Amino acid sequence: MENKGLHEECGVFGIYSMGDIEKIAHNVYYGLYALQHRGQQSCGIAVSDRGVVESYKEMGLVGEVFNDDTLNTLKGQMAIGHVRYSKASESNNENSQPLVLRYSKGRIAISHNGSLTNAEEIRNELSHDGAMFQTQTDAELIAHIIAHQRLLVHSVEEAVINAMKKIEGAYSILVMSPQKLVAARDPLGFRPLMIGKKGESYVFASESTALDAISAEYIRDIEPGEVVVVDKDGLKSYKNNCTGKRGICIFEYIYFARPDSTIDGVGVHDARLKAGEILARRHPADADMVIGVPDSGLDAAIGYAKESGLPYGTGFVRNNYIGRTFIKPKQSERRKSIDIKLHVIEENVSGKKIVMVDDSIVRGSTCANIIRELKEAGAAEVHVRIASPTIHWPCYYGTDIPTREELTANHNTVDELCEIIGADSLGFLANEDLYELMQTEEKTFCDACFTGNYPTEIKE
C-alpha cells in the first residue's frame, strides 16, 4: 500500500475467435475488468472484422468507459484490450491503448505491458528517419519497428520476431494484423503473458484470473522470448528469441498481481503466504494480533499469523471505490486518497500490541500515516513487517520506483526508518528469502530494485 508511483504496470487481453464466441468485445470487457488492478487510468478495446478495425478507448475505469451500447458496436473475429497506468506527464487519452496504426500493409493494433530500456535510442533513430509520433508510449515505438520489418519479410509474425532483436527491456505485447493475432514476451519474461482457450478460440491475458473471468481454460504461460500467432489455421509457436533464461519481476508476486492468479507456475497467494511465514521466522514479535494492510499485505499477514501462532484479525476497512493509492499521479491527490481509503477498526486494535504486515516501503510517508492512525485508535504497539526487502535501486523495466535519492532505504538504516515511521519495531525480508518465496534454487526472477543487479544492460 506504500505510495510507489508505479507506472507502465498495465494489463493486456486478447481473443481470436474461431467462430464460437459471440459478442467478442464483451468477453474482452470482462477480461479487462479482471485486470483492472493492473491499470486504472485508461482502458480500450480494438476489434478487427477481416481487417476492418474499430476501437474505443477513454480515460477511466473499465466499468466507466464501456457500456452495452459501446460494446455492441465493436464486432469482429478478433480483439485486443488494455488497461493502463501512466506517469502524470503521460496521463491523457492519446496515450491510451490499444494503439491502432495504418501502414502500407493495412492496419495493426497493439497493446503493450512493460518498458523498453532503449526507448530513447529507438525514438531518436526513428525520428532521424522521418518518423512522426502521436503518443509518448513504447507501444508506438514497437509498432513502428514491426511495420518497418513487415516490409522486409513475408508475415507479421516474422516481423515481430525480427523486431524483438531491436527492442530491449520488458514487454508483453499483443499485435493484431488484418488476419492474425500475435502474442510475444521479452526474452527474460519480465511481465506475465499466458494462453487460454474458450471452446475452439484462443485467449491471451496478463494473468490467469482474466481467463477465469470468461470461463476460458488456462493452457500455459508464454515462454520468455516466445512468439505465438493465431490465425484461421490455429496456433503456432516460434522460439527464435528464447534463451532459456527467466527474469519475471518479483513485484508481480509481492504487489502487482491478483492473489488468485498463477504466473509461471507459481501461485501469487502461495507466494505471499510464504513471504509472511518467512517474516514470522526472521522477525518474531511479542504481540496480540496480526493485521494486514489491504490488499497485497493481507495474504502475507495470514502467513505471518499461521507461522507465529498469533491470531489474525481485521485492522482496516477498505473503501473499494477508490483506486490504488499509487494510481494518483499528484502527491496532493495521493495524500487525500490515503486519508479516505483505509479506516481503522478501533475496537479491534485498541489496547493491543499489533503486528502490521505490508508489501513494501518506498518513501515511508504512507506507512507512517497508517501507523499514526492505528495509534490514534488506541493500539498499544505497532510492529511493522514488510513482505519484501529494502528497496535501493530504480527499475527500468516498467515499475516506476523513484530515483535512488528518493528511496528512504538509501538514507536510513532500518532502525532509523523504524523511528521515522513511528513503529515499535520494523523488519523486512532478506534478499535471499526471495528464492524460498519463489520456490526455486535458481535465479528465475528480477530483483534489481533490491540488489542493483540488473539482468540486462542499462544504458545511460
Image: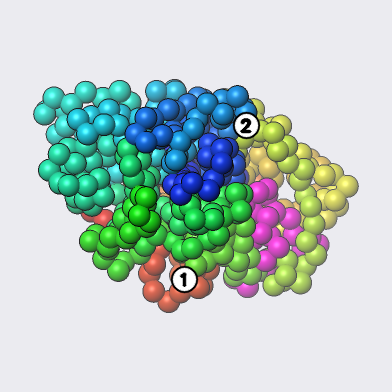
In front here: 115 or 199? 199
What residue is disc 2 on? 63
Numbered disc 2: secondary structure:
helix
Left or right of 39, for residue 183: left
The residue located at (23%, 29%) in the rendering is 103
The residue located at (29%, 49%) in the rendering is 169
Left or right of 448, for residue 408: right
**Amino acid type of the residue that numbered disc 1 sits on in the rendered structure:** Tyr
Image x and y of residue 115, in percent: 34, 43
Image x and y of residue 251, in percent: 48, 54
Alpha-carbon distance for marks 1 and 2?
38 Å
In front here: 272 or 170? 170
**Amino acid type of the residue that numbered disc 2 sits on in the rendered structure:** Gly
Whether 321 is drawn above or below 441: the answer is above
Numbered disc 1: secondary structure:
helix
Q: Is any atom of residue 426 visible in this view?
A: no
Q: Is any atom of residue 203 visible in this view?
A: yes
The residue located at (34%, 45%) in the rendering is 180
Name, please, the residue furthest toward the bottom: 441
**Segment tinted magenta in the rendering:** 281-303
Left or right of 242, for residue 269: right
Whether 426 is drawn above or below 43: the answer is below
